[in-house]
Image (tube, grey):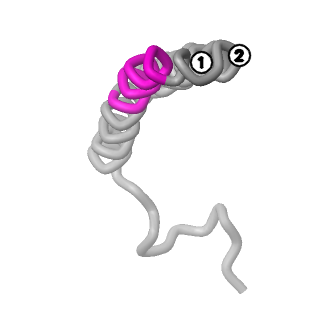
């Protein structure tokens, strides 16, 4: 029986982890920018919803910072 700590063909190399983290960072930054752009448009419909979307953008930025920290911690 395989356990999660056993070596397998699914193990990632450091290079693969760096690539994955970079992808997630870029993806998050794109979403964060999109959230902010759309929040301005949503404000015409609901200022509360727009504020929630702005909050989501800030949380996405915090996630991105953690991913950047993970990259440094490799």
| Residue situated in front as seen by the camera: 3 or 30 | 30
For disc 2, the marked residue is 48
Residue appearing at x 38%, y 27% in the figure: 34
User: Residue 68, position in %: x, y?
Assistant: 42, 21
In the rendered image, the quadrant that contains the N terminus is: bottom right
Vertical side of 6 occupied by 31: above or below: above
User: Residue 2, position in %: x, y?
Assistant: 67, 80
Q: Is residue 11 visible?
A: yes
Q: Quadrant of residue 32?
A: top left
Residue appearing at x 31%, y 50% in the figure: 16
User: Residue 5, position in %: x, y?
Assistant: 65, 61
| Residue situated in front as seen by the camera: 59 or 41 | 41
Residue appearing at x 53%, y 17% in the figure: 44
Q: Give the Cα distance between marks 1 and 2.
A: 5 Å
Mark 2, Cα crowd under 10 Å, few <14 / some 14-19 / many 20+, is few
* Mark 1 and mark 2 residues within 8 Å of each other at the beta carbon: yes
Q: Which residues are magenta?
A: 30-41
| Number of marks in the rendered image | 2
In the structure shown, which secondary structural element does the residue marked by tag 2 occupy? helix
In the structure shown, which secondary structural element does the residue marked by tag 1 occupy? helix
Mark 1, Cα crowd under 10 Å, few <14 / some 14-19 / many 20+, is many
| Residue situated in front as seen by the camera: 59 or 50 | 50
Q: Which mark is residue 50?
A: 1
- In the picture, measured across the screen, residue 37 lies left or right of residue 55, that is left
């Amino acid at each position: 029986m395989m356990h999660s700590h056993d070596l397998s063909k699914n193990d990632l190399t450091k290079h693969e982890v760096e690539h994955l983290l970079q992808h997630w960072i870029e993806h998050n930054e794109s979403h964060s920018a999109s959230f902010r752009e759309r929040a301005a448009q949503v404000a015409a419909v609901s200022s509360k919803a727009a504020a929630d979307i702005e909050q989501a953008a800030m949380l996405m930025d915090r996630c991105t910072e953690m991913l950047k920290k993970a990259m440094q911690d490799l």
